[in-house]
Image (cartoon, coloured by chain):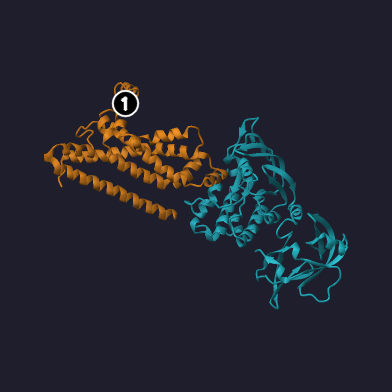
Amino acid sequence: MKLHIEVQKKMGDFSLQVNTDISGERVGIFGQSGSGKSTLVHLVSGMLQPDSGEIFLDGDCLFSSTEGINLSPEKRRIALVFQHAMLFPHLSVKSNLLYGYKRCSADNKRIRPEALIELLKLQPLLERRVQHLSGGEKQRVALGRAVLANPRLLLMDEPLAALDDALRFQIIPYLVSVGEEFRVPYLFISHSLTEMQLMTEKVLVVQKGRVEEETTPEQLARQRMAQSQNGYLNFLRLTDPLLQNGLFTYSWGHNTLFISDGTENSESLFELSSREIILFKKHPEAISARNLLNCTVTEMFNSDGRVGIVLSTQGKQLVAEIVRPAAEELNISTGSTLFAAIKASSFRRLG
Amino acid sequence: MMLSPEDLTAIGLSLKVALTATALALPFGFAVAWLIVFKPMKGKVLLEVLINLPLTLPPVVIGYFLLLLLGKNGWLGKLLTASGIEIIFTWKAAVIASAVVGFPLLVRSIRLGMESIDQQLIEASRSLGASWFDSLVTIVLPLSLRGIMAGSSLMFARSLGEFGATIIVAGNIPGITQTIPLAIYDYASSPSSSTMALSLCIVSVVISVTVLFLHEILARQLDRSSGL
């Protein structure tokens, strides 16, 4: 997907001025509310008209003030997923799913309803009324409906913001797999750094109606480590748990991790804050933390007076965070070997 | 209860006029409500005032304006006469009078229904490939059905009771333009016909109650089928 946006739009006191080229399949637009993310969504999807400028998607002109082109929303083939599912209340789940599919020209019908229904596990919901679906089910149907329109681009505007944490992390794998399986590029709009890390490969940071920077979710998370409430979040997708003495064990690379908050599910996603990792220069003899990993420092970075230590252990990577005096005292540098202690209760299960 | 053949004609005519007026006004009412709710435009206030005017003006005044407009020397009347169409003092005049007087009620109800539709539903349908008209037919229309029904019942009931504007543009000709209210008016003017007047009053009540009941039942059914 290649999206060229060069637009100006003034709305009351707020003015949006964006001049950027976006390429990639999983791109995030990150910003606080009021930063102009939603206006940008409206401009790209054709619901709002820029005051001036041009928008091109994969070389096709969607809008150009100089050429007098303004493609109507239905011709842009950009499907929207909103914060609230916005299913059509007078139609069944099935009719909702097929709404866009029926309106898609035969040449563009690449994604078949059966395949999508299977991937999103929608079969049991098909004959239901949309009012009888739970929040997560609704959002899954909304996603399916958008993908079945066989769009060139999927615009997801805070699609997880209305869901609670447990549901959020249940939906994320679906979002990712739909993008991968059906090769639908998406723009993912959110104010959550975690969602950026889990959903995107590239991020545009939007602030006050401008694109402030283009970066990767990894860089963004490192930059914000010091200010963010939980530091840098490491995400670990772990499989095949074993229950031993009341603790779950998961293999991670060649390490074994002990986790209190595990489940018997075959796959779980955990988050581990960079601040929950304690570093030792030498092997501590006796320690209550259940996890002690032998690591090598591969990289160090600064984030507002804090030092981020990128640790490599048995082919896996973790980011730990310490204050600068601690880094100096321990004389840590790239290539140093350290022991990282992590309590079994420090891993938070997300889904 | 006593009903003369003229009374029966009046009842039939009343129903015919009310039904035609409602059916005639419905597409316009829908279009105007849609314009007000969904289309950003200048002079919206003016449009709203104009539409609601019949609600506040005395019906007689409306009737008089219609007479000026549609009469032999009115600018529209001249055109119609030239094409051989007679309006004034026919049942068609009663239809127009009812349509004008009931129009604001119709628009108000449809508008209320439309205002409850989330704008994002329409955006969703557009982004899924529906043109504005497609979206209007498949999303806006079904979701404002309740408003349309409420507006139609209100307008139908209002048309049944139309008197002031009708008597001026359509007159009170038994068998031709005499609707129930006009017939009651005739009976009430002569002291010997109070039973006849009462009979027609009862008929009026029965029709009104039936319309309101029908509306309630249909609305409930709609609620059930849409699960709202």
Q: Is residue B56 left or right of residue A84?
A: left
Where does the image place residue B167, in percent across and percent down from the top left? 25, 32
Dividing the picture into quadrants, the one containing residue A272 is bottom right
Question: Would you name the residue on which mark 1 appears?
Answer: B70
Q: Is residue B78 left or right of residue B118?
A: left
Label 1: few (<14), some or many (≥20) within 10 Å? many
Where does the image place residue B157, in percent across and percent down from the top left? 30, 43
Q: In what quadrant of the picture does the C terminus of chain B appear?
A: bottom left
Q: Amino acid at mark 1?
A: Leu
Please identify the residue farthest to the bottom as the structure is shown: A245
Towards the viewer: B144 or B205: B205
Identify the chain drawn in orange.
Answer: B
- Is the residue A283 above or below the residue A167 in the image? below
Identify the chain drawn in cyan.
Answer: A
Where does the image place residue A161, in percent across and percent down from the top left? 61, 54
Where does the image place residue A157, in percent across and percent down from the top left? 62, 49
Q: Is residue B59 left or right of residue A188?
A: left
